[in-house]
Image: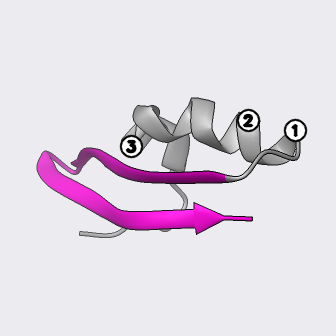
Amino acid sequence: MSLVGESLYRAFPAITEPVRRVLAGERVSFTGTGEVEGEPGVLPELRFF
């Protein structure tokens, strides 16, 4: 499974809103789930301060 050349937002749509909040300067902690090449994937808990 590879994300090379893929959009993380397409593979893990649940991260779109948390990333927007981070870019707006908020502190955010979240776990992202999605699908890559038909296989389930999980982004472990991410924290941005």
Question: Rounded to the nearest whole Å, what is the CA distance between mark 1 and mark 3?
Answer: 22 Å
Question: How does the figure colour the protein chain or chains?
Answer: one colour
Magenta part mainly helix, strand or loop? strand
Count of all numbered marks drawn on residues in the image? 3
Name the residue that disc number 1 marks: 24
Q: Earlier in the sequence, mark 1 or mark 3?
A: 3
Examine the structure image and report whether residue 19 is included in the region drawn in magenta: no
Q: What element carries label 1?
A: loop
Identify the residue shown where x is 88% and y is 47%. 25
The crowding category of the residue bearing disc 1, from other C-alpha atoms within 10 Å (few below 14, some 14 to 19, many at least 20), is few
> Range of the magenta residues?
28-49
Name the residue that disc number 3 marks: 11
Identify the residue shown where x is 40% and y is 42%. 12
Q: What element carries label 2?
A: helix
Q: Which amino acid does label 3 sit on?
A: Ala
- Residue 20's label in the rendered image is 2
